[in-house]
Amino acid sequence: MTRIRTGALALLLLLTTASAAIGPPRIAIIIDDLGYRLKAGQRAIDLPGPISFAVLPGTPRAFVLATEAHARGKDVLLHLPLQARANDPAQEPLGLNLDMSREEFGDVFSRALTSVPYAIGVNSHRGSMLTRHPGHMQWLMDEIGSRESLFFVDSYTTHHSVAMKIARESGIDARKRDVFLDPDRNPDTVAREFERMKRLALRRGSVVAIGHPYAATLELLERELPKLANEGFELVSISVLVQNDSARTPTNP
């Protein structure tokens, strides 16, 4: 009996130590589509904790909001418009399309990146068409890889996306979106997806969620983000998760 109890205590100690080493489930939240509405963007930047912000290039408030987010210690990403459907090129300024030449593609990417100061990573905007094309995704990863320390986040608007595969083959640090917090603007939907985000974090150890500067989304985040630590979660910037993934991925000799 004593041996059984000793063994059980040893197992419990081992599990507790392993859990402590792993740490709490990590959540990274990116707010997309900043650049058009100043007040909504500023309200998003006011959210507590290390929320990350993806800014659309060439938009009227891109420079101001990217600069303000950086000044507040937040991660800034280039929210790069990619073509979503055939015969429907990217509608936003400085978007990338299938009919571009390699030279045009690189030139537009450079101008997009320049328009969003302090960007440390790139995440895709729309892109259900372009992200399924290996050649164009290779061009994108070549552009990202030619800039120091940029990483990539696939917003994953289609399960046919090959962006993550090409990123990894190209040695680009990358992460995929797990949850959209607001596939519609109904407060009940946002609340449901926020809870799903937490369940996924518990199951997987970390999760990437994307939301938008909608009133329903911001209201829920303002209310719920301060509770995450007491619920056993760690809110982190997207760069922390990407770096953590990179550190755990073995490199080829």
Image (cartoon, helix red, strand yellow):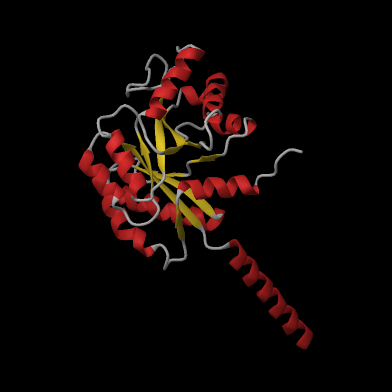
Q: Is residue 19 above or below residue 220?
A: below
Q: Is residue 130 above or below residue 61?
A: above
Q: Can residue 217 be seen in this snapshot? A: no
Q: Position of residue 223 (x, y in %)?
A: 29, 59
Q: Between residues 128 and 59, which one lies in front from this camera angle?
A: 59
What residue is shown at x 25% (from left), y 46% (from top)? 42
**Quadrant of the rendered structure where residue 225 is?**
bottom left
What residue is shown at x 27% (from left), y 46% (from top)? 186
Quadrant of the drawing holding the C terminus: top right
Residue extending farthest to the right is: 3
* Number of numbered labels in the structure image: 0
Q: In the rendered view, does 35 fall on the left or right side of 18?
A: left
Quadrant of the drawing holding the N terminus: bottom right
Q: Can residue 218 be seen in this snapshot? A: yes
Q: Position of residue 161 (x, y in %)?
A: 52, 29
Residue extending farthest to the bottom is: 2
**Quadrant of the rendered structure where residue 104 is?**
top left
Q: Position of residue 185 (x, y in %)?
A: 28, 43
Q: Position of residue 77 (x, y in %)?
A: 41, 38
What residue is shown at x 70% (from left), y 74% (from top)? 11
Q: Is residue 251 above or below residue 187?
A: above
